[in-house]
Amino acid sequence: MLSEDGLCFNSFCMNMLIGALLDYYRQQLYSYNSLIKRYNVYLKPLHIVVKKGLKGSKKVYYYFGKYWYRLEVSNSKLKWIYIGKEKPFDYLPDPPINPLLIIEVKRVQDKPDTLCVYIENFGEVSELISYVAKIVYVCCHELKKHVVKSCIENELKNYGSS
């Protein structure tokens, strides 16, 4: 369903879209880190922080491609040494753009299980997000839940080869 230039999904399909975008972004980060490893710095693909609250509750925060590290070997162990949030050297190529930073997800007021994704115009990344969103939309609406993920994965294999 299209709504004011947004593509709308039920919560299951929106989770599939977010998962597909994060999988793609993680692959981009791994490629980027392979490219810059000769400078001994890395953009950590995923950083997880768990905060424990009162009464045993906990919140989990996920940070994708936000923190820079260098690796050190100490006593035969690999250590990640935090060096900051900013790209450490100007001569490094720019890292890939996190697709989650250029989308907005809104819940439809009169349909609580309907979420719409709106994509900011950001060139090639926006085109990729639109492509992935359309694949998820088709796979989610034409197939049963248990085959949606494989449908999305199969369709995404074709991205870039067409």
Image: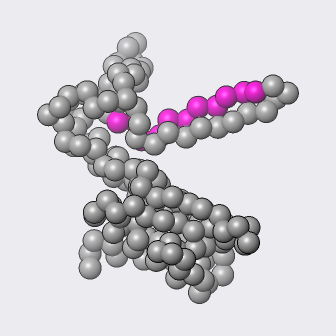
Magenta residues, as a range?
43-53
Locate the N terminus by quadrant.
Answer: bottom right
> Could you say where residue 126 lies in the image, as x and y percent from the top left?
35, 64
Q: How many marks?
A: 0
Quarter holding residue 89: top left
Is 10 situated above or below 101? below
Residue 141, magenta (yes or no)? no
> Looking at the image, which residue sits at the far top?
75
Q: Residue at x 25, y 27 (%)?
A: 88
Quadrant location of residue 8? bottom right
Residue furthest left in the image: 91
Specify the quadrant that holds the C terminus: bottom left
Confirm whether residue 150 shows in the render: no
Q: Residue at x 60, y 83 (%)?
A: 141
Q: Left or right of 101: which side holds 61?
A: right
| Residue 44 higher or lower than 147, as above or below | above
Magenta: main secondary structure: strand
Q: Residue at x 37, y 29 (%)?
A: 85
Residue 112 appearing in the image: yes
Q: Is residue 11 left or right of residue 66?
A: right
Percent across and percent down for residue 128 are: 35, 67
Residue 48 lies in the magenta stretch? yes
Q: How is the image coloured?
A: one colour
**Residue at the far bottom in the pictured view:** 142
50 is higher (above) or lower (below) than 81: below
Question: Horizontal and vertical percent for residue 82?
Answer: 39, 22
Q: In this rendering, is residue 88 above or below 5?
A: above
